[in-house]
Image: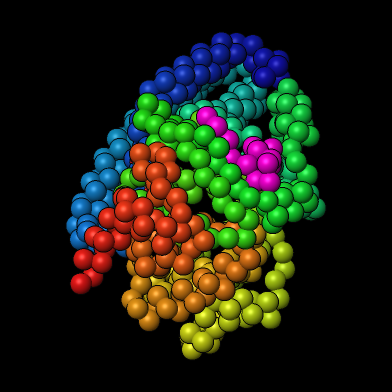
Amino acid sequence: MSLLFVLAPQLAPILGVLMLAVSSLVAVYKRSTVKVFKAYGLTQASIADCVTETFSAIRTVRSFGGEKRQMLTFGNQVLEFEKSGIKLGVFKSINESITRVAVYVSLLALYILGGNKVKAGELSVGTVASFIGYTFTLTFAVQGLVNTIGDLRGAFAATERINSILSGSEIDQALAYGLEKDIKQGLGTNNNLKMFFNNDPNDKMRSQNTRYMSSLTAASSVRSLASSGDICLEDVHFSYPLRPDVEILDGLNLTLKCGTVTALVGSSGAGKSTIVQLLARFYEPTQGRITVAGEDLRTFDKSEWARVVSIVNQEPVLFSVSVGENIAYGLPDEHVSKDDIIAAAKAANAHDFIISLPEGYDTLVGERGGLLSGGQRQRVAIARALLKNAPILILDEATSALDTVSERLVQDALNRLMKGRTTLVIAHRLSTVQNADQIALCSEGKIAELGTHAELLEQKGDYASLVCTQRLAFE
Ligand SMILES: Nc1ncnc2c1ncn2[C@@H]1O[C@H](COP(=O)(O)OP(=O)(O)OP(=O)(O)O)[C@@H](O)[C@H]1O
């Protein structure tokens, strides 16, 4: 810049005007495109959301014949995206045109003025030529800056959306810092993981984390407590964060004796799945506590707790990798040998169907395991749970969606899985829970009846009526 002033003090004011014009245009450009870029980013994100949601719940969509509705929603979003894209394009081209016109008009003025000065003998041709050369370079640099600022707008709009999601949820210390500790142990040279932790600017938060982590029960104790102690839900109250005024559990007490099977029954909406979510620590009780061998679960870090609890759901989620890799996912942080995978698959009654697949254990299972039948998916999930070998097992309506043959194979595999573990089974079909060591009937957020099948039948209470209703339904 100073070189330019030395070269041509007379032309510098023109350059100043030129720079001022371009800078003003940059400022105007920045302000005018914020909203348009934001709308463009949002419509793009909503298309992605729609696709992810549809494909992750494709069975539900199909079972309701919802394809047309999903296609309409997707089509509307594409049109919205097209509209906002065109609007953005128009904005970009108007701004680009104005910027270019301003630049070239300024250059024209420069040529005229420079030419006149040369003609009058005030400046040499060389000076004017170098001046114009520098001005060109500067102009293109400013234009590049304008374009970069344009791209940054899009990035800012996306960042704002991410921040609005992050700021809406509090950090779950038991999960976040347990996870951080876990990942740090395995960081090694993995730069993909390192980038999550290198830039923590908040030292205060870090010292809180350290205090929090040091108050946790040691990892080795978690497994031994879970393997040897009863699990007690003591006066547990719970409301979901999105409906804090509705009490789902209202002073619930229940003991799951170590190494035995407890069946949880009750009408729809009674709170059975909520109990599972609390045991898995997806949520914490709003009042009361859950203990294992007398230790409050909140003193365990969540990743340690996750290692000692296996959950097998009615609709197990498989990943779109091979069958073998899905089974090995039972121990995600370890190298699992092929022999261990096969042993788990055999115990889960899954080996025979797996070896009949086109590529055996290397066969890909498709998106969410969609290339396998419901019973096959469950047996793969059971093999995964067997490999995990967790002392606590939760079966959430694991056999209710199967035909008789599949159900027998799955039930057989489950019996093997349940052996020696503290198990909680949720099943609507009472025939599947009759052999449990105890049956708990959940009603209005409490355990209303507790005992063996025979004891509860004798009580002639709600459980007895449920059994009666289901018998009638089967007759
Ligand atoms: N994430 C949530 N946010 C708010 N309320 C919820 C949430 N999940 C469940 N509920 C409510 O909590 C209550 C208990 O639900 P829960 O799923 O525990 O019942 P359930 O006994 O397992 O029912 P089902 O046998 O039909 O699965 C229901 O009234 C339900 O509407």
Left or right side of 8 for 46: left
Residue at the (73%, 26%) spot, across then down:
208
Quarter where residue 90 is shown: top left
**Residue 58 is one of the magenta-drawn residues:** no
Left or right side of 137 for 100: left
Q: Position of residue 251 (x, y in %)?
A: 47, 33
Quadrant assignment for the C terminus: bottom left
Q: Nearer the viewer, residue 63 or 466?
A: 466
Q: Nearer the viewer, residue 128 or 436?
A: 436
Q: Position of residue 30 (x, y in %)?
A: 45, 23
Q: Magenta segment range?
A: 287-300
- Vertically, is 460 above or below 155? below
Quarter where residue 302 is shown: top right
- Vertically, is 330 above or below 33? below
Residue at the (72%, 64%) spot, across then down:
334
Residue at the (58%, 82%) spot, across then down:
346
Q: Residue furthest bottom?
A: 356
Residue at the (68%, 41%) spot, across then down:
294
